[in-house]
């Protein structure tokens, strides 16, 4: 089944404890992206990647890191999480050669709480 | 930076009534416009998109949206809603040769029996 998977789905952690949220897609998509969803603010783009080893900042990259060593994986790293990073996180991917111009396929989301 | 404005945070409507969800965007340059839908406790799914060509685009489940360049709007409409349309709807925009993606704040459509 074609899909975007995220792990974990739920995470409660404490301030300053490094964490990684994994994202994987099995559709051979080149474009991948991370978003955070907050009530009243919609989705805001954190980072995106056009292809392996090519990443760039979205609108709200502060406090986050990403890497794209393989085409299928795009992990999101919070090296020192803070309470203002409590949010619902979505990973998405898009078909080859089309960047964000076409349909993005979203993962199920990761609900992160930082105490 | 782009901005996307969804004027209504919540829209209550009775079943079989028409509905319009409003979306305005900031840029007048070449844009790509999208509506995504999020059902409770799920990720987002593409509802419809405008890339070029006809300014009226339709989805398979009866929604339509019209690209209005002069008013920088991309409102979503459905002539008769169903209970199953209850969800949150997000308008989104990207630009030609520009790899970022911008979402509006979302409109919760609540269809009542």
Image: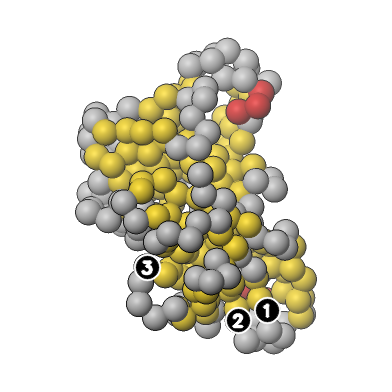
Spatial CA span between label 2 and label 1: 5 Å
- Residue A76 lies in what quarter of the image? top left
The residue lying toward the viewer, choosing from A58 and A92, is A58
Q: Is residue A21 visible?
A: yes
Between disc 2 and disc 3, whose residue precedes? 3
* Chain bearing mark 1: B
Pointers 2 and 3 within a single chain: yes
Q: Is residue B76 above or below residue B26?
A: below
Residue where numbered disc 2 is placed: B78
Q: Closer to us: mark 2 or mark 3?
A: 3
Q: Is residue B67 above or below residue A2?
A: below
In this rendering, position of residue A110 left or right of residue A99: right
Spatial CA span between label 3 and label 1: 23 Å
Residue count near mark 1 (Cα–Cα under 10 Å), binned few <14, some 14–19, many ≥20: many
Between disc 3 and disc 1, whose residue precedes? 1
Residue count near mark 2 (Cα–Cα under 10 Å), binned few <14, some 14–19, many ≥20: many
Q: Is residue A22 visible?
A: no
* Residue occupying the point 46% across, 81% down: B56
* Chain bearing mark 2: B
Image coords of residue B79 (percent x, y): 62, 86
* Residue occupying the point 25% across, 46% down: A30
Image coords of residue A70 (percent x, y): 23, 33
Residue count near mark 3 (Cα–Cα under 10 Å), binned few <14, some 14–19, many ≥20: some
* Residue occupying the point 42% across, 70% down: B50
Residue where numbered disc 3 is placed: B51
Residue where numbered disc 1 is placed: B19
Q: Closer to us: mark 3 or mark 1?
A: 3
Count the marks.
Answer: 3
* Residue occupying the point 68% across, 79% down: B19
């Amino acid at each position: 089944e074609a899909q975007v998977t995220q792990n974990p789905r739920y995470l409660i952690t404490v301030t300053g404890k490094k964490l990684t949220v994994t994202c994987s897609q099995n559709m051979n998509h080149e474009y991948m992206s991370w978003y955070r969803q907050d009530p009243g603010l919609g989705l805001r783009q954190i980072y995106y990647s056009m292809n392996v080893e090519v990443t760039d900042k979205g609108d709200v990259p502060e406090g986050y890191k990403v890497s794209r060593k393989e085409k299928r994986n795009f992990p999101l790293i919070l090296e020192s999480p803070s309470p203002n990073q409590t949010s619902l996180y979505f990973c998405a991917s898009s078909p080859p050669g089309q960047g964000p111009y076409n349909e993005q396929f979203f993962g199920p989301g990761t609900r992160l709480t930082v105490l | 930076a782009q901005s996307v404005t969804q004027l209504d945070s919540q829209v209550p409507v009775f079943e079989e009534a028409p509905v319009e969800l409003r979306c305005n965007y900031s840029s007048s340059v070449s844009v790509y416009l999208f509506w995504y839908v999020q059902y409770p406790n799920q990720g987002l799914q593409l509802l419809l998109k405008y890339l070029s060509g006809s300014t009226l685009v339709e989805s398979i489940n009866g929604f339509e949206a019209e690209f209005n360049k002069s008013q920088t709007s991309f409102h979503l409409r459905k002539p008769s809603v169903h209970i199953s349309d209850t969800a949150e709807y997000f308008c989104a925009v990207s630009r030609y040769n520009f790899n970022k993606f911008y979402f509006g704040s979302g409109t919760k459509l609540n269809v009542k029996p």
